[in-house]
């Protein structure tokens, strides 16, 4: 206390001496009244400056203390689902950072990062090149340079995954309206996913992201859901994607494993009105490290809705789009009530952010 009083006294003397000098310089006689008034004004200015500095410092600390959530690179960063992912990360008080594209040293790239002589007429990665990616994985890439610092990652939704990257290679599904492949993004995601799985980096994979998690893990895939249903004499009723591609479909999901990370996050056996937009899917995870933890049944046909790696600290893939529900609720979009509630949708991202 004595040191504080001494410091205050020295500060007052310093201000007084400065006021005397100032008043003399402008031709004013430094009488007691003028000194008191000038001193009070100077102290107010100093206090205002100190307060402003404190506010700026606090804001800076708050910004720097936000947890960063990394997002895998996408060739379409203006898409509704991708932007929704970034908005959701911000909505839970975190900072989104989009990683750069990962390159395979087994492939050739142009200056604009597009692949050279690598795709067929549908944009699908050529089989022999896909084989090199699947064989050499992330060790033949620049992933360590780009992602060595990350402590969590989201693989967001997007276009179809090239069937040549599947363990059991598929062909083009033949649907003219679904040809939005990106071999560059598929290679980037495949390499990054293989890295994250090996390094046990907390991972949340959404829709296409869940499919990539499954593909890298060796799962069997469904190339087109309506075609698959038709082959069984069933009707998918547009459950997983609106047939006219105008809105996100909405359906319920049954959580099938109470010991799962999914159940721990949601604390429910049924997730209602999840936003959905996909026509590819996961057929089976048999003989892979994955565990199915949620399903949807439509016309007696079961579709996999969530998978996990239980041997890793946090590795969850969901076939639906919780980020879309978050955005619709936060932005108060007209159809927000058609989809899952804000708390349920946000819980996936909060769980990833809070994971240690």
Image (spheres, grey):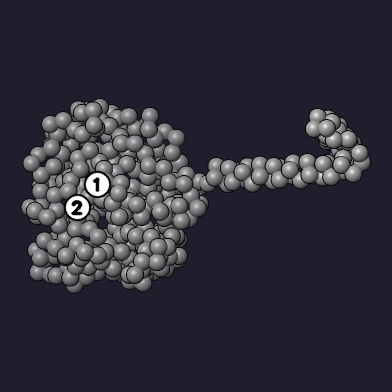
Q: Of helix, strand and loop, which one carries label 2?
A: strand
Instruction: Specify few, some or many for label 1: CA neighbours under 10 Å numbering under 14, 14-19, or 20 or more.
Output: many
The tag earlier along the polypeptide, 1 or 2, is 1
| Residue 168 numbered tag | none
Q: Residue at x 78, y 41 (%)?
A: 42
Front residue of 231/25: it is 25
Say whether marks 1 and 2 touch (CB < 8 Å).
Answer: yes
Residue 3 at x, y = what percent?
88, 37
Q: Which residue is mark 2?
A: 221
Front residue of 208/80: it is 80
In the image, is residue 119 above or below residue 59?
above
In the image, is residue 229 above or below residue 27?
below
Residue 126 at x, y = what percent?
13, 37
Residue 99 at x, y = what percent?
37, 39
Residue 4 at x, y = what percent?
86, 39
Say which quadrant the N terminus sits in: top right
Q: Residue 151 lies in what quarter of the image?
A: top left
Q: Of helix, strand and loop, which one carries label 1?
A: helix
Q: Residue at x 20, y 43 (%)?
A: 182
Q: Which residue is mark 1?
A: 215
Instruction: Specify few, some or many for label 2: CA neighbours under 10 Å numbering under 14, 14-19, or 20 or more.
Output: many
Q: Residue at x 83, y 41 (%)?
A: 39
**Number of callouts in the render?**
2
Q: Is residue 268 left or right of residue 30?
A: left
Q: Residue 232 lies in what quarter of the image?
A: bottom left
Farthest residue to the front: give it.
27
Q: Residue at x 30, y 34 (%)?
A: 102
């Amino acid at each position: 206390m004595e040191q504080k009083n001494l410091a205050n006294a020295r500060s007052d003397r310093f201000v007084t001496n400065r006021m005397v000098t100032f008043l003399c310089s402008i031709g004013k006689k430094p009488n007691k009244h003028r000194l008191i008034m000038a001193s009070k004004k100077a102290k107010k200015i100093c206090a205002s400056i100190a307060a402003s500095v404190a506010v700026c410092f606090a804001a800076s600390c708050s910004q720097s203390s936000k947890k960063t959530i990394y997002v895998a690179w996408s060739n379409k960063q203006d898409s509704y689902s991708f932007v929704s992912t970034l908005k959701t990360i911000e909505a839970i008080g975190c900072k989104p950072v989009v990683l750069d594209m990962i390159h395979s040293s087994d492939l050739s790239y142009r200056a604009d990062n597009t692949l050279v002589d690598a795709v067929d007429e549908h944009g699908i990665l050529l089989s022999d090149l896909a084989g090199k990616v699947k064989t050499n994985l992330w060790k033949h890439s620049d992933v360590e340079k780009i992602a060595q610092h990350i402590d969590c990652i989201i693989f967001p939704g997007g276009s179809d995954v090239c069937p040549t990257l599947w363990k059991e290679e598929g062909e083009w599904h033949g649907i003219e309206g679904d040809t939005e492949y990106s071999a560059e993004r598929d290679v980037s995601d495949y390499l990054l996913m293989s890295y994250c799985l090996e390094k046990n980096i907390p991972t949340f994979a959404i829709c296409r992201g869940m499919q990539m998690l499954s593909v890298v893990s060796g799962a069997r895939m469904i190339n087109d859901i309506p075609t698959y249903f038709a082959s069984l004499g069933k009707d998918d009723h547009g459950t997983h994607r609106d047939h006219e591609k105008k809105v996100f479909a909405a359906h319920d999901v049954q959580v099938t494993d109470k010991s799962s990370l999914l159940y721990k996050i949601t604390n429910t056996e049924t997730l209602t009105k999840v936003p959905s937009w996909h026509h590819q899917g996961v057929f089976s995870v048999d003989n892979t490290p994955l565990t199915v933890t949620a399903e949807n049944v439509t016309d007696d046909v079961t579709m996999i809705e969530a998978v996990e790696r239980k041997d890793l600290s946090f590795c969850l893939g969901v076939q639906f789009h919780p980020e879309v529900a978050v955005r619709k609720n936060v932005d108060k979009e007209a159809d927000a009530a058609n989809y899952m509630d804000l708390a349920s949708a946000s819980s996936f991202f909060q769980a990833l952010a809070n994971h240690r």
